[in-house]
Image (cartoon, rainbow, N blue to C red):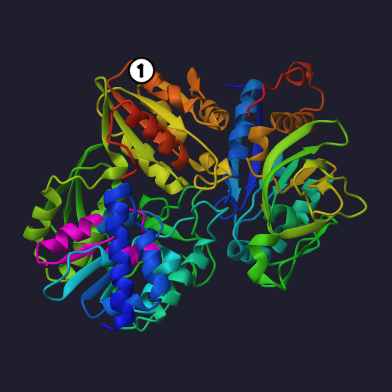
Amino acid sequence: MSIKSSFAEFAGRSSYWFLHNVFHGGSSLPGKITLKLDPNILSEFSKKYDLVIITGTNGKTLTTALSTRVLREKYPQVVTNPSGSNMEQGIVTAFITAPRAKQKGLAVLEVDEANVRMVTKHIQPIAIVMTNLFRDQMDRYGEIYTTYDKILAGVKLAPKATIIANGDEQIFNTKDLPNPVIYYGFANDHQEDLRAPANTDGLLCTKCQHILHFHNITYASLGEYFCPNCGFHRPELTYKVTAIGSMTPTSSKFQIDGHPFEIGVGGLYNIYNALAAYSLGRFLGVSPAQIQNAFQADEHVFGRQEIINVDGKEVTLVLVKNPVGLNQVIDMVLTDPEPFSFGFLLNAHYADGIDTSWIWDGNFEKLNNHSIKKFFTGGERYKDISTRLTMAGINDIEEEPDLAKVIDKIKQMPTKHVYVLSSYTAMLQLRKELAERKYIQGGMD
Amino acid sequence: MAKYNLKVAHFYGDLMNTYGDIGNIIALKYYGKQMDTDITSDIVSIGDDFDDQQYDLAVFGGGQDYEQMVISKDIPHKKEAIARFINGGKPFLAICGGFQLLGQYYVDANGEKIPGIGVLSHYTVTQSSHRSAMQNQTRFIGDIVIKNPQNGDLYHGFENHNGRTFLGDDEQPLGIVQEGHGNNGEDKTEGAIYKHTYCSYFHGPILTRNGNLAKQMLLEALHNKYPNEDFSKQESLIIKPTF
């Protein structure tokens, strides 16, 4: 390591120690300091670590967390970045704060779609995992095709990395790459001719511009697609979900390649995350038995879906930020066999998306078919979400614009189970209130 | 079972749906119910024929550049039927990309001039085609309020567009900009009205925030379809504010 890099790493490590111990924070600043002193610091880490990148719109965080656990079954030193710190600075911080490795370690990094290039410029990854691409907060991000081009700009710098991609996502099958490619997805033996619901994106066959059809849809535009016009179809899958068992908001049972698995979190989308982690694990030589073991460990990895006890109420707080994620959460909530109450908190700051139109792509109509005891809305844009629920046919909605009073509202709910879906800044505010009243430890992670 | 029924053609609803445009259909159904009217809708997409006689209303949303470019090649096949529908005074709501495609032409993000079907007289250029690095600076993004010059109604929404649209002589703006940018940031117009066709850059979606416009379109469609009926009860429906 050059003197410059050593000094840069030392400066970053010291600032992290200082921030962490004095201010109890600091995930991007140490990386920022290190990068300022040595912009090529990531190249130095390539000598000490093999690298895996995980990217895509939804599911990056959980896939990274599950993959880290899976790979720790085999590799003694696995480094990862904490939830959300997926830009260059956060990634550098992950490296400089890791315990110094005795032998070559493995880094499993969640990387923002546009930042893949910043990493592959310095380190050749052995694998790049792609989860999915959906439209996401359009006032901040571009269209899905532009986003994919950004990922490919990074892939281009890493032609030897094996791509481990969601085969049920058409866009990952559109460009011929020099890289080895492995696909994972949901096995299907149905031969129906289905069309995706109207408010789904990515439905044009990228080969001939006709509307894609499906033999099977898992959710949104994911599934066994085919083009009736030109014959373009889903690629051969290497790793497959072969059966779905019982699903509740806090557990999912399923089989991959015939091996039974269970994870302590609900939602079909999380089975995709588990499948991605399984595929990466198998690719790197982890056995199905070791993966079963990794999935079962009870460590807290499902931060975005934790259950908070509020004076006896079991409150599930879920972050929602785009239509596909929202619809998956609605489906997950509806697997609760117990009666429950349903709240939605909506703000429209930059981090939430300043345009609230996306709530109209949520399938709130589905909530009508269920015995939900009580609905409530809150946040600065509570009227928008109340209107959405009203037009979905839901009457009798309680409104609480003041997020400081939402906890009292939750306590008044007639059920033990309470689900609160929330946009990002509304979530931060509610968590702050919950922390002040000692219901949680505080902070976002 | 409602007394009346109206059928909506949802143009390219599976491709042009980027900003919750489905909400306009949901709002038509919601207000239709309050007006004793069942609303059903069909997606009329790529390769589908459009039989204008079958439909009483039409909705055409906004989409991504790629989808809009593909649609620009399909929609000429539907041009005659769409022209009959619009010129026959049937209510048509066109948002963003839909608004642009009904006009003479638009210039896409790559600076390419793409013909519309020319049923309406406006055209759309782009400010950022020569300086794509500045795209985010030149995009009109934010809350917008306009005032309908015909009836004084205020419409609230959210705009997010790169195109700059200029209206033809036979079009009226949907509203005069009170806050925000509007069609082009220069002449204070937002959207367009031609007969019973209403165009806009509004997301929100427009009919969920502006129930008066939904009511107006539904009444026009009812009068077209049931010319001898008395709709005074429907006309007296009070729209409650939703934001």
Quarter of the image for residue A259 reads bottom left
On screen, residue B47 versus residue A406, left or right, reads: right
Query: Where's residue A166, x and y in %?
Result: 32, 63
Q: Give SS at disc 1.
A: loop
Query: What segment carries the magenta color?
Result: A65-94
Residue at the limit of the structure toward the left, as seen here:
A289
Which residue appears at 33% of the width and 65% of the height?
A91
Q: In front here: A381 or A245?
A: A381
Query: Where's residue A435, x and y in %?
Result: 33, 32
On screen, residue B139 versus residue A381, left or right, reads: right
Q: Which residue is mark 1?
A: A413
Q: In front here: B216 or B40?
A: B216
Q: In front here: B76 or A344?
A: A344
Q: How many dots with numbers?
A: 1
Which residue appears at 63% of the width and 34% of the height?
B208
Quarter of the image for residue A336 reads top left
Query: Mark 1 — on which chain does it sit?
Result: A
Q: In front here: A265 or B232?
A: A265
Q: Amino acid at mark 1?
A: Met
Q: Does the magenta-highlighted stretch encompass residue A232?
A: no
Query: Where's residue B91, x and y in %?
Result: 76, 40
* In the rendered image, the vertical position of residue A103 relative to residue A213, given as above or below: below
Q: Does the magenta-highlighted stretch encompass residue A68?
A: yes
* In the rendered image, the vertical position of residue A329 relative to residue A291, given as above or below: above
Can residue A330 be seen by looking at this rendering? Answer: yes
* In the rendered image, the vertical position of residue A10 relative to residue A308, given as above or below: below
Which residue appears at 75% of the width and 52% of the height?
B82
Q: Quadrant of the N terminus of chain A?
A: bottom left
Query: Where's residue A205, x and y in %?
Result: 49, 66
* In the rendered image, the vertical position of residue A80 relative to residue B236, given as above or below: below
Can residue A123 be seen by looking at this rendering? Answer: no
